[in-house]
Image (cartoon, rainbow, N blue to C red):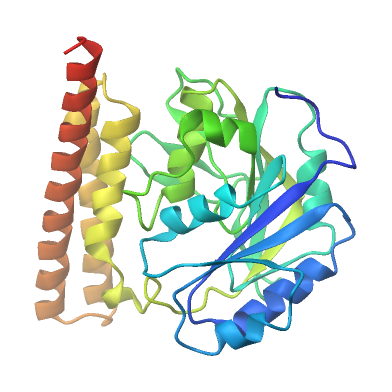
Amino acid sequence: MNKNFNKSTFVSVVVCTYNRAKYLEKCIESLKKQTYPHFEIIIVNGPSTDETSPFLERYPEIKLVNQDELNGLSFARNLGIKASNGEIIALIDDDAVADKDWIKYLVEGYTDESIGGVGGSVFDINGNRCGFKNGYISKAGIPSLINEKDLNYNDPNGNFFNYITGTNASFRKSVLHKIGSFDAYIKYNLDETDVCMRVILKSGHKIKHVNNAIVFHAIAEGHNRVPPYYINWIEIIKNIIYFTLKNFPNEFSSYTFRPAKSLLIWSKKGISLYINNQASLKQLFDIHLKLVHGAVRGYTDGLILNTKRLYKGNGK
């Protein structure tokens, strides 16, 4: 049963990590300095091949979940949620550092039963540049990252929707269970945004921004985060188009205008790399091939998902 949370509410902080031991140490130490006392740390590891595993032996109080293979961030987060004891699930990246009052302010954000998720602001690791504040997203999967105030886009019939970023997010565990937690199909990009959409559209809850819950993000390179040309263009556009078809299956624009708009925007990003000498003409061609490939996959998988829904809805 949903309820208003208070200063004794238990929180589970889930951190998914892969070969980032030097960053993970700073993240854990920031969590150990939290002013909010009632929480546990759950690390979903790898399978890391660096010194992460022996490093974690220094923290016997941390709950450890080991993966046998990389199945994507959504899958890893679901493992952490499954192992959790908290009424609130908080998420932070392994290359991020939490302000000492981070958990405290997240919990205080659950002011009434309508709030299903709470997230805060994200700055660079030195605190000089804001990367996320009061974000919202369109039905085409196009985000607005920084806004001066929470625009409270929580109307299921609206055109824009609040979302919180995965390195500074929290959700009621009861709501996560209700919507099916993270979609393992989305391995990278829009994973937490898809959860926010389903919190608003499926559970009838709201996503709330609290600017004083602050995380500092190093944005370290990894298997998904690499220099611009080498980013996973296929996975990114695949998930954007799938996100649109999955969450807005009954709207004609989800099958026409919105996928085309998303593909155009990301094509322009590739052209920008070429113009700024960050990619050669050959690489630009390769980027566009990947974008088309990813778009076809996302569109096809979204159609298949919605066809299955329709078939099931007809009782067949």
**Closer-to-camera residue (207/313):** 313
Residue 72 location, x and y as percent?
A: 38, 60
Quadrant housing the N terminus? top right
Q: Number of numbered discs present?
A: 0
Displayed quadrant of residue 270: bottom left
Q: Is residue 152 left or right of residue 140?
A: right
Q: Is residue 211 left or right of residue 313?
A: right
**Closer-to-camera residue (248/32):** 32
The answer to whether 9 is drawn above or below residue 103 in the figure is above
State whether residue 151 appears in this view: no
The answer to whether 86 is drawn above or below residue 66 in the figure is above
Quadrant housing the C terminus? top left
The answer to whether 141 is drawn above or below residue 187 in the figure is above
Residue 245 location, x and y as percent?
A: 26, 33
Displayed quadrant of residue 129: bottom right
Residue 220 location, x and y as percent?
A: 51, 78
State whether residue 173 appears in this view: yes
The answer to whether 68 is drawn above or below residue 245 in the figure is below
Q: Residue at x 47, y 24 (%)?
A: 201
Q: Residue at x 28, y 63 (%)?
A: 269
Q: Residue at x 74, y 77 (%)?
A: 59
Residue 212 location, x and y as percent?
A: 79, 51
Displayed quadrant of residue 21: bottom right
Q: Is residue 254 left or right of residue 293?
A: right
Q: Residue at x 16, y 25 (%)?
A: 307
